Amino acid sequence: MSNTYQIIDVMSWKRQLHCQIFRNALQPQYNVCLELDVTHFCKKIKENGWPFSLAFIYTVTKCANDMEEFRYRFLKDDIVLYDTIHTSFTYLNQETELFKVVNVPMQDTIEDYINIATQTIENQKEYITGPVDNDVYQFSSLPWISFTHLSHTISGQKDKSNPMFDWGKYYEKDGKLMLPFSVQVHHSFIDGFHIGKLVERLQSYLNDK
């Protein structure tokens, strides 16, 4: 997946101080867990015959890509802003009960994304093809449980700034289908305010599309 980016002039960047403070933190990533209303979204994907996971990954990626805060990354000695962030997600092999990591470039339409992702899943035999790219969002699902909290393994790479999105088993509450959703981000680039804006954008998309 080829990509283009711009190198940020840190000295004139409004977030210079905040970025440096959190970059030096012992654990600069943090996680927020919440619930999303997927009532309308589930009806929509059923009407179109789309798999929930792939449709949801596309939706989150589209909304996150609309916000530049989610497209910043550390790249060697630079801070860069990617034009587009792609996707990397886990997919369970039902026979071995082991997951493989599947990388799929973002597409302009949900139909194109689902088609390419489906083909990639079917054709990829390896469980893991290499290190996770810098210009992806990482996705993983726990469709067996409706979690209220989630944590990730810590690689020890403090400059690893790929946002990580997880979701659990949706359940009915007050006539609505509610989905546990987790967002993990690097505080150098993303504050709670920005997660709030993303969730607002995402919920609106789930309600309307």
Image (cartoon, helix red, strand yellow):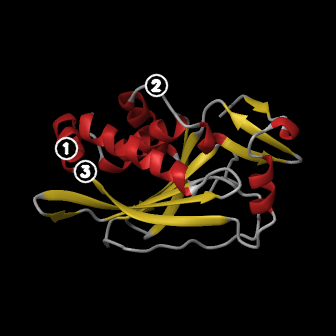
Query: For mark 2, what is the residue?
Result: 108
Residue 202 circle label: none
Split into 4 quadrants, where in the image is the C terminus? top left
Mark 3 and mark 2 lie on one chain; the one further toward the N terminus is 3
Depth check, mark 3 against mark 2: the one in front is 3
Provide the secondary structure element on which disc 3 rests.
loop
3D distance between C-alphas at marks 1 and 2: 22 Å
Can residue 165 be seen from the camera position used here?
Answer: yes
Identify the amino acid type marked 3. Answer: Val
Position of residue 54 in the picture relative to residue 47 (left or right):
right
Toward the viewer: 82 or 130? Answer: 82
Position of residue 175 in the picture relative to residue 190 (left or right):
left
Identify the amino acid type marked 2. Answer: Asp
10 Å crowding of disc 3: few (<14), some (14-19), many (20+)? some
Marks 1 and 2: CB-CB under 8 Å?
A: no
Query: For mark 3, what is the residue?
Result: 38
- Residue at (23, 41) in percent of width and height: 45
Toward the viewer: 147 or 129? Answer: 147
Return the x and y of residue 20 as percentages of the image width and height: 81, 56
